[in-house]
């Protein structure tokens, strides 16, 4: 067995002392809560009695109930996927379109970049409250005031499920456009100018250049943007809680919002243990998308190495 020198021991002690705050935080706020939630998901523990009554196991009943009888959670899954997929599609499309425009030599493009990224530095709570102020107030809200100048009829942005979901998607795209745009813009600017110039000399038009050169070159960045945006959208909570509270009815209820309601607001017969089971369902759904991203990334890197 190799003997560890005094200097190496000292370096190890220093290393662990430096990362100890992070390790303590990881243990206290991630590992322990996740472990407890996994245990609770197989019980019927309630928030009010979590420390006063012994845990009573219910086996897989919580998970079985989620997929067989809980219509609210099934609707929440559907709502979350509708919100996430439409938002991410619009986010990727608009980000790519604007990135292509800002890559051109236009007057004031640096100002446009700053303005587009500005919403990303505003906390999501402030964003949601700001847009709620703009969209609420019936026919006389701020948004309808500007729509009237365009000759459009007033809109009740939270009057039904379709309009409320559309409003949520709009706010999500508005707040997420900046970071997505910068990533794609950086990927586009990383394309070799020699390739683009050679394509232009060969008579390739703009559409062909986009399809056969730009999109394949930024595919890795696009996959990263789409899947990370999708994962974060599947966990949407703050904006939904502040804008619609899952309403009208449960038409905009997301998985995260329903889990919090079941765990802390004690709706009906739902318990903390049942909410923990729902949380692990959400975890596995997001884990699948994260796993897909890792697989696609590894394949892309393999293709690049083989190409070299």
Image (cartoon, grey):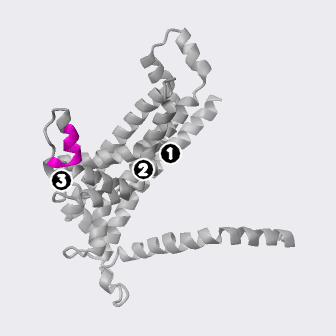
Residue 125 — which label? none
Q: Residue at x 28, y 49 (%)?
A: 168
Q: Which residues are magenta?
A: 140-147
Q: Residues within 10 Å of mark 3 (few under 14, many from 20)?
A: some
For marks 3 and 1, give the one nearer the viewer: 3
Please give left or right for residue 53 compared with residue 19 in the image. Answer: left
Q: Quadrant of residue 277?
A: bottom left
Quadrant of the snapshot with the N terminus = bottom right
Mark 2 or mark 1: which comes first in sequence?
2
First in residue order: circle 3 vs circle 2: 3
The answer to whether residue 45 is visible is no
The quarter in which the C terminus is drawn is top right
Characterize the local packing of mark 2: few (<14), some (14-19) or many (20 or more) Cα atoms within 10 angstroms.
Answer: some
Residue 37: say if magenta.
no
Residue drawn where x is 35% and y is 89% of the image: 54
Q: Secondary structure at mark 3?
A: loop
Q: Are marks 2 and 1 in contact (CB under 8 Å)?
A: no
Q: Which mark is residue 137?
A: 3
Q: Give me the residue at 52% from left, 75% from top.
A: 28
Residue 170 location, x and y as percent? Answer: 30, 44
175 on left or right of 24: left
Q: What percent of the width, then of the height, locates residue 240? A: 29, 57
Give the labeled residue for mark 1: 295
Relative to 140, residue 53 above or below:
below
Prevailing SS of the magenta stretch: helix
Disc on the earlier residue, 3 or 1:
3
Residue on which the image places disc 2: 289
- Do labels 3 and 1 touch, CB within 8 Å? no
Nearer to us: label 3 or label 2: 3
């Amino acid at each position: 067995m190799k003997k560890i020198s005094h200097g190496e021991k000292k370096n190890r002690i220093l290393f662990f002392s430096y990362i100890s705050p992070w390790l303590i935080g990881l243990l206290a706020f991630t590992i322990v809560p996740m472990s407890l939630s996994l245990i609770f998901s197989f019980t019927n523990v309630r928030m009010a009695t979590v420390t006063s009554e012994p845990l009573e196991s219910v086996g897989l009943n919580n998970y079985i109930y989620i997929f067989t009888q809980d219509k609210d959670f099934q609707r929440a899954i559907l709502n979350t996927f509708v919100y996430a997929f439409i938002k991410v599609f619009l986010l990727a499309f608009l980000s790519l379109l604007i990135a292509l425009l800002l890559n051109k030599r236009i007057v004031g493009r640096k100002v446009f970049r700053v303005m587009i990224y500005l919403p990303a530095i505003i906390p999501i709570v402030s964003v949601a409250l700001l847009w709620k102020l703009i969209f609420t107030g019936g026919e006389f809200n701020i948004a309808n005031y500007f729509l009237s100048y365009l000759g459009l009829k007033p809109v009740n942005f939270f009057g039904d499920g379709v309009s409320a979901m559309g409003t949520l998607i709009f706010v999500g795209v508005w707040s997420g456009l900046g970071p997505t745009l910068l990533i794609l813009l950086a990927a586009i600017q990383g394309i070799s100018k020699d390739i683009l110039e050679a394509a232009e000399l060969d008579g390739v038009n703009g559409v062909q250049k986009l399809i056969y050169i730009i999109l394949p070159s930024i595919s890795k960045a696009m996959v990263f943007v789409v899947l990370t945006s999708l994962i974060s959208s599947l966990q949407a909570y703050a904006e939904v809680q502040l804008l619609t509270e899952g309403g009208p009815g449960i038409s905009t209820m997301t998985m995260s919002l329903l889990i919090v309601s079941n765990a802390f607001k004690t709706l009906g017969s739902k318990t903390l243990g049942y909410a923990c089971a729902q949380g692990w369902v959400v975890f596995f759904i997001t884990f699948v998308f994260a796993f897909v991203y890792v697989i696609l990334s590894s394949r892309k890197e393999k293709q690049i190495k083989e190409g070299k």
